[in-house]
Amino acid sequence: MNAKATRDAFGDAILELGRINEKVFVIDCDISKAMKTGDFANAFPERRLNVGIAEQNAASIAAGLAAMGKVPFICTYAVFGSMRMCEQVRTGICYPKLNVKIACSHGGITPGTDGVTHQATEDLGILRTMPNMAVVMGADYYATKKLVKKAAEYDGPVYLRFTKDPVPVYYSEDEEFEIGKGKLLMEGRDITIITFGEMLGQGKLAADELTQKGVSVELIDIHTLKPFDVGLVSKSITKTGRVITAEDHNIINGLGSAVAEIIAEMGYGRLKRVGLKDTFAESGDYYGLLEKYEMDSSYIIKMAGELL
Amino acid sequence: MERDIKYLTQKANELRQNIIAMIYKAGAGHPGGSLSIADIITAMYYDELKIDPQNPGWTERDRLILSKGHTCPALYSVLAMKGYYSTDVIGTLRKFGSILQGHPDMCKVPGIDMTSGSLGQGLSVGIGMAIGAKADQLDSRVYVIMGDGETNEGQVWEAAMCAAKYKLDNLVTIVDKNNLQNDDFTDIIMPMSSMEKKWDAFGWEVFTIDGHNMDEILKAFESARKVKGKPVCIIANTVKGKGVSFMENVSMWHGTAPNSEQYEAAINELKAGDII
């Protein structure tokens, strides 16, 4: 299967955005090579800042630029974009609802070999809790490219999460996306698999195998954790009554929790959450980590077996 | 231009009376640091800033960020005095439904350029605004008022190095050096010795003034306009609680509202200082 890192999609999308929207600024924090912003920097040096290893400063500079009508993209790793500058984002960006985009690579365990210091597995829970913040992760290269462009059009703060490691390409180039509107990829009656970000790869593998075994699977790529597509998800739960969530994140406070909230309020449905089980991961190759920490397709299939 | 120092001094004294009245009525707030910036903020709104109170969103205006947001009674008062909203509003400070939150909210208050209150962030915001203004070829200037205690925050120094890198000569920060912070004197809590040398070493043009001397304040702003290729830091030596003798240099008045007797005494002392 063709695989690409979704941070590459960000680099390509931000360059295109630079051409069509002169309000777009890039704020780098000394990791522009990893963030793939080099082409933007070369094309639009006057709209690109590199503030060095100072993420808190980057966050508040973005607030100032947004107050002047610009559309700044802070470019850093997800651990820093969600935690090092957490309070600057909450108080300085979300509270005044400033039009700042936080573009973060190294989401989840996708900087596999870098280890825990550079793996962001709590970020979704943190960002999801902040009023006014949208939380978005494309499943693959094409989804990410489209969603980055949508984020630039979206009025308000958006947290964008990318992978460092290559992940399977699922969509075609002309697929369209809307922030806050999930993708119903397979329709079924027996069980719903909801994936966030690149976990679509594992979810799809599991769904195909289950289908071969005669299970009728509904597959949803939610891509926007907030605002959450409650309509799509609750409709699917009503139909199947069984849900598996798959996320590259702690099973606490991310996608699994968002779906658990819906199930609890509906008073209907059974749930299994696939993700990191309230633990840190470690250095290792991405697929090896998925297997070791029970986040891969075979574990999703196992969980399906428990629900069916 | 011959400035009317007497008029500005009187306005600053009126501002101090408003500060005391609004904090007394709210039953909470930060009088000490509001009083220490009263002269500076008066000079800014009555002389220095390019603003239009009838058009708070005017694109070409100068921007002011009160990074020490807890001293918003000074800012709220001067905005009312300048006609951004009715002076009746200042009596609603910290009350349910008021536009005047405990710390400034740019979405609620006309004339507030940035939400603030979490210390250490304002100078970085100012960098973003100064760069944004230059990108649009606006000759808007950006002013940031911070406290000396606030400079304990590491982000202040991230911003200090960054503003110099980008040669932001449209950015001025004023350090309200009143030598007190919440818990005690700054030298006891966290000595920030050689404030001038620190900013100078980071690549800023530094002016040190008496922050209660209207003439010196105005001249510092004038000098700041002549600086090219680097940002300007004005270190204003001030007295926390300035103008109300029993509040001066007492850390308790960082964040305490006066009771009715203290309110009367403070207002009477300030009224006695009216010169017009």
Image (spheres, rainbow, N blue to C red):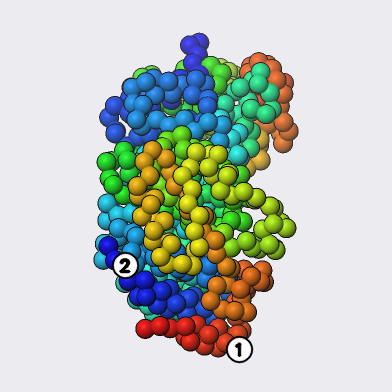
Q: Nearer the viewer, mark 1 or mark 2?
A: 2
Q: Nearer the viewer, residue A134 or B99?
A: B99
Side of A190 where A8 appears, left or right? left
Mark positioned earlier in the residue sequence (1 or 2): 2
User: Taking the image as drawn, is residue B4 in sight?
Assistant: yes
Residue under the point 35% across and 49% down: B225
Q: Amino acid at mark 2?
A: Arg
Q: Residue at x 39, y 24 (%)?
A: A41
Q: Secondary structure at mark 2?
A: loop
**Nearest the eye: B83 or A36:** B83
- How far across and down, in percent of the image, does residue B40 sit? 45, 64
Q: Identify the chain of the residue marked 2, using the numbered disc in the image.
A: B
Q: Position of residue B166 (x, y in %)?
A: 42, 35
Say above or below: A205 vs B57: above
For residue A246, the mark is: none
Residue that mark 2 sits on? B3
Q: Which residue is the site of mark 1?
A: B261
Q: Is residue B205 above or below residue A117?
A: below
Give how far apart the Cα atoms at labels 1 and 2 are: 37 Å
Residue B276 against residue A89 in the figure, above or below: below
Using the image, name the chain to which the residue with label 1 belongs.
B
Q: Is residue B162 above or below residue B68?
A: above
What x and y, as percent, mark residue A226? 49, 43
Residue positioned 27% across, 51% down in the render? B60
- Residue A294 on image: x %, y %: 69, 25
- Under circle 1, the secondary element is helix
Q: Which amino acid does the dot numbered 1 rest on?
A: Glu
User: Image check: B246 left or right of A10?
Assistant: right
Location of residue B217 by image quarter = bottom left
